[in-house]
Amino acid sequence: MSRPRFLGPGGRVGTFTVDAESTGAGRGTWEPFVDTWNDRMGDLYPLPEFSAATVDGFRGTMRSVALQDTAINEMWASSPISTRAVGTHEHDEIRLYVGLRGAVTLRDPHDRAGDTDVPAGTYFAHHVVTENHFHTTPGIATRIFIFPGDALRSLVSGRPRSGPVTSPAAQILMAHAGMVQRTVGGLGAAGARASRDALIELAKGLILDHFDDHEPTFVPALAEAAKELADARLTDAGLSPATVAAHLHVSVRTLQRSFAGLDESFAAYIRRRRLEEAARALAAPGSRLSVSQAAAIWQFTDSSHFIRSFKKWYDVTPAQFARLHGAGRDGS
């Protein structure tokens, strides 16, 4: 079984992915993941032993990001996952479970009375001092953040935290985590340290439900969260810097400041993304979308406004763009 490629400068900085669609279900995917994790992070954060049904029946994708003493593991699996045995050695780490689909159940964690469920749409953060068993439902998707104990122990030791992933603090942390996943392969030592420190600061913000919006690590994460919110609402007539700022519990000025170092303002970002999505829809094979319909869907004042904006960006009218890309139609 071949090892997954580790993308990054090496050591404990980089990312790797295993996918059952590429390597086959079962051990062909599971064991390369475990071996690579043990090589990179196993001395810091040893994995528990998993059940034979998990190993032999695994169908899904797992991706890990290593940032020195911090990690993000993401699992998307149609098969259930469960542990068989856990070690007895002491741990000192903070784990943050984020439910994306299905549910993870932690069996009797030391700082909770009884089992703890982490269903889709929620998070759970606690201090791990001994490994505990867990199992998942089929159709699971989850992110598991691992932080060194020293960084967050004082905030969660004996006081596990949980809440919805729709909270502003959770959305900002998730946006930064996604950005780290996309860029970690190209980070140098300084960039890795900055990304690691930002994850920890944003995790503190999640636990405390409060951010210092003057903290340098907050700025790029806020911009990324705003972009993700905008991308999900491009056809919403109410989308604006003001509504996104309100959703993220920051002032419009703070939101605008987070874009100050980028190539465009947040309002310009929304306009560009609406034009891009409209262009994609107009040029889609077999599309019968008219220019006036596109203008209405992507919230331009009228067809004339849409055509002017489109031509300014693409140097052709929407109808011309559609014909050039093989979806010719009446441009009305």
Image: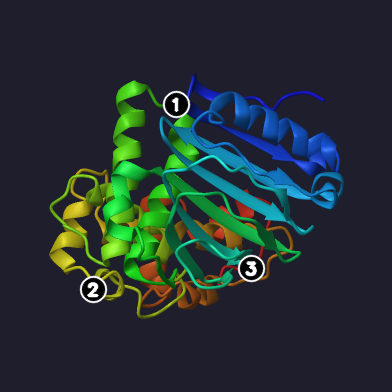
Kindly identify which residue carries mark 1.
186
Q: Is residue 319 left or right of residue 229?
A: right
Say which residue label 3 marks: 103
Q: Are marks 3 and 2 in contact (CB under 8 Å)?
A: no
CA gap, disc 3 and disc 1: 33 Å
Q: Identify which residue, 152 or 300, lies in the foreground.
A: 152
User: Badges 1 and 2: C-beta atoms under 8 Å apart?
Assistant: no
User: Disc 2 marks which residue?
Assistant: 242
The amino acid on which the numbered mark 1 sits, given as a three-letter code, is: Gly
Q: Earlier in the sequence, mark 3 or mark 2?
A: 3
The N terminus: image quadrant: top right
Identify which residue is drawn at 24% across, 45% down.
217
> Would residue 251 be found to the left or right of residue 100 on screen?
left
Image point 20% across, 68% down: which residue?
A: 250
Looking at the image, tell me whether mark 1 or mark 2 is earlier in sequence order. Answer: 1
User: Label 2 sits on what residue type?
Assistant: Ala
Whether label 3 touches label 1, CB < 8 Å: no
Q: Is residue 218 left or right of residue 79?
A: left
Q: Nearer the viewer, mark 1 or mark 2?
A: 1
Q: Amino acid at mark 3?
A: Ala
User: Is residue 274 at least partly visible in the picture?
Assistant: no
Mark 3, mark 2: which one is toward the viewer?
A: 3
Dot 1: what SS?
Answer: helix
Secondary structure found at label 2: helix
Q: In this picture, is 323 found above or below 56?
A: below
Q: Position of residue 244 (x, y in %)?
A: 30, 70
Quadrant position of residue 155 = bottom left
What residue is drawn where x is 65% and y is 36%? Answer: 17
**Disc 3 versus disc 2: distance between alpha carbons?**
34 Å
